[in-house]
């Protein structure tokens, strides 16, 4: 190939390269011309100098931002080369575009305030005084009002702490001439907190142990800050021991490690107890069913009393297990919080970690010597406990109750709880703990009527009055089993000893 041909080919290549450069330069100007003040910027950081962050907008000029504006409260820069810088175009000069987190005085004019309102661009302001219902704020040289509810994302206890502070605000109201301005710092604070929260949540996992700080406490738990996210530690998760209120164990500002139990959306459940050894497991190696132990009464409820066997290990004394000698309506009749009592362990449920206790099991059973306490056909003065559809229950002596069957109750009698009545015992069933009662002055006619066969009484309503035969009544006292009266007695006995529905240990019985 001749030198002339080579020269011609080289010139053609240079011309093509020049045209490509001019075309790219023109595209650069076109892209740059589209950027204007107030535009949102999200661009990668390409260089970090001593005072500025340099980002590339893809046009002729790079943009820059002051490092101080993107540093934290301690002056530390958390961004690096390659990170995405978020902000707004606040000005343009020979060096390029100026990017900032908010508009400042040096970059704005009156129209800029209007633009900031319409485009929701944050503006920098300084709180200079407290006024009725809020604060006076200097926004880019103009006076603005910030309601007290809009100065912070948290409740404000002392308004004076904000005086002299420079904060970023968003203009939420602006008149046509910008003479009336209402601003909010809270909206920006909540937005920033939400972004930080989502960032932190993305790094958390259930089961993680993380450092936290107690921010505030309520009756149901404590809110713990775990690096920008507030989690709730329920009062039941503070300790294995019963905690009435968080303030008894924790202090505001206290730093501690907590375990993440669950994450649901933006809600985080925390626990301090989960990091402690379960005392129930240790206790199970030291006690067993049937053991007698000393314990301290912690809390009284209508269904029973909770007692502490060991620190963090509690058992329930049901109200039905408190006394053999009397019916207990409420535990406070025999116990009070703080009492030390000796009980027997009735049952241990390792699956639910519940323990059932009994005071009654350690008390003498009056039925062991029932023959010495109760005599057949011997009159006594008893106290009516209750009247049911199948008879009247009467206290014979402490811990001993008998039944006057409904079929034996005279139609003229109207027994009420607490009435004193004179009766006698006609039958004792020691095996089933049943005593049958009757009047001491029953007439021969009443006895004869009760002795008739059941079928005959049914045919004579005046003699029977719809009641059972005497023979059936005696079945209660230890005769034929399986009758209707036996079923009624069992129903009554179950009702007396039944645990109420809200008893958390009801499944133990």
Image (cartoon, grey):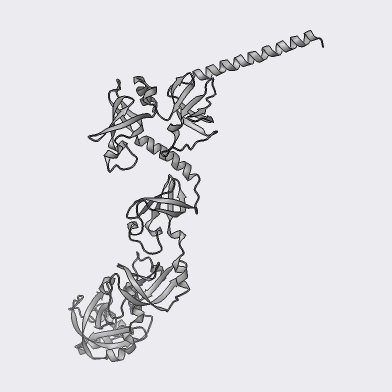
Task: Give me the residue at 73% from left, 12% from top.
Answer: 10
Q: Is residue 354 left or right of residue 28?
A: left
Up/down of 423 relative to 78, above or below:
below
Of residue 352 and residue 394, the one placed in the foreground of this image is: 352
Could you tell me if residue 316 is visible in this image?
yes
Quadrant of the rendering where the N terminus is positioned: top right
Furthest toward the top, the residue is 4
197 sits left or right of 465 in the view? right
Q: Residue furthest front?
A: 50
| 496 or 212, nearer to the observer | 212
> From this viewpoint, is residue 303 visible?
no
Residue at (37, 53) in percent of width and height: 222
Residue shown at 43%/56% (left/top)? 271
Instruction: Where is residue 432? Give x, y as percent.
Output: 36, 83
Q: Quadrant of the C terminus?
A: bottom left
Q: Quadrant of residue 460?
A: bottom left
Q: Is residue 475 left or right of residue 52?
A: left
* Number of marks drawn: 0
Snapshot quadrant of residue 126: top left
Measured as percent of width and height from the top left, residue 258 is found at: 44, 54
Task: Check the image and report above or below for 74 versus 260.
Answer: above
Q: Of residues 101 and 358, which is closer to you in this image?
A: 101
Q: Is residue 225 above or below residue 460?
A: above
> Relative to the observer, which residue lies in front, 145 or 485?
145
Q: Position of residue 60 (x, y in %)?
A: 54, 20
Most distant residue in the right direction: 1
Where residue 458 sits in the image (x, y, percent)? 28, 79
Give the quarter of the image for residue 354: bottom left
């Amino acid at each position: 190939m001749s030198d002339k041909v080579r020269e011609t080919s080289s010139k053609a290549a240079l011309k093509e390269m020049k045209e490509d450069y001019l075309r790219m330069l023109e595209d650069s100007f076109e892209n740059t011309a589209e950027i204007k003040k107030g535009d949102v910027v999200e661009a990668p950081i390409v260089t970090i100098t001593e005072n500025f962050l340099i980002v590339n907008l893809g046009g002729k000029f790079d943009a820059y931002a002051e490092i101080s504006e993107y540093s934290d409260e301690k002056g530390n820069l958390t961004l690096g080369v390659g990170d995405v810088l978020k902000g707004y175009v606040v000005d343009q000069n020979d060096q390029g575009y100026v990017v900032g987190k908010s508009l400042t005085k040096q970059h704005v004019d009156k129209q800029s305030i209007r633009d900031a309102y319409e485009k929701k661009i944050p503006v920098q302001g300084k709180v200079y005084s407290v006024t009725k219902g809020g604060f006076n704020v200097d926004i880019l040289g103009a006076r603005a009002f910030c309601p007290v509810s809009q100065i912070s994302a948290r409740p404000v206890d002392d308004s004076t702490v904000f005086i002299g502070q420079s904060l970023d605000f968003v203009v939420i109201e602006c008149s046509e001439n910008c003479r009336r301005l209402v601003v909010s710092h809270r909206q920006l604070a909540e937005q920033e907190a939400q972004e930080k929260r989502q960032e932190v949540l993305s790094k958390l996992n259930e089961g993680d142990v993380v450092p936290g700080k107690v921010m505030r406490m309520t009756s149901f738990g404590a809110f713990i800050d775990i690096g920008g996210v507030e989690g709730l530690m329920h009062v039941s998760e503070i300790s294995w021991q019963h905690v009435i209120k968080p303030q008894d164990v924790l202090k505001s500002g206290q730093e501690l490690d907590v375990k993440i139990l669950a994450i649901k959306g933006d809600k985080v459940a925390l626990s301090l107890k989960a990091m402690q050894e379960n005392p129930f497991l240790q206790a199970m190696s030291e006690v067993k069913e049937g053991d007698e132990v000393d314990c301290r009464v912690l809390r009284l409820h209508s269904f029973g009393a909770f007692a502490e066997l060991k620190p963090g290990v509690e058992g329930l004394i049901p109200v039905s297990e408190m006394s053999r000698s009397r019916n207990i309506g409420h535990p406070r009749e025999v116990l009070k919080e703080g009492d030390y009592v000796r009980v027997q362990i009735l049952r241990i449920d390792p699956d639910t970690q519940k323990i059932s206790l009994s005071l009654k099991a350690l008390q003498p059973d009056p039925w062991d010597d029932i023959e010495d306490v109760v005599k057949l056909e011997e009159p006594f003065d008893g106290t009516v406990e209750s009247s049911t559809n199948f008879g009247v229950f009467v206290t014979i002596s402490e811990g001993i109750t008998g039944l006057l069957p409904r079929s034996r109750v005279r139609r003229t009698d109207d027994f009420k709880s607490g009435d004193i009545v004179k009766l006698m015992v006609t039958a004792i069933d020691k095996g089933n703990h049943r005593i049958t009662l009757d009047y001491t002055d029953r007439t021969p006619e009443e006895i004869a009527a009760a002795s008739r066969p059941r079928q005959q009484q049914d045919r004579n309503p005046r003699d029977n009055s719809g009641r059972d035969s005497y023979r059936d009544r005696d079945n209660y006292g230890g005769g034929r089993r399986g009758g209707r009266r036996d079923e009624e007695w069992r129903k009554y006995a179950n009702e007396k000893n039944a645990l109420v529905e809200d008893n958390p240990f009801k499944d133990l019985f």
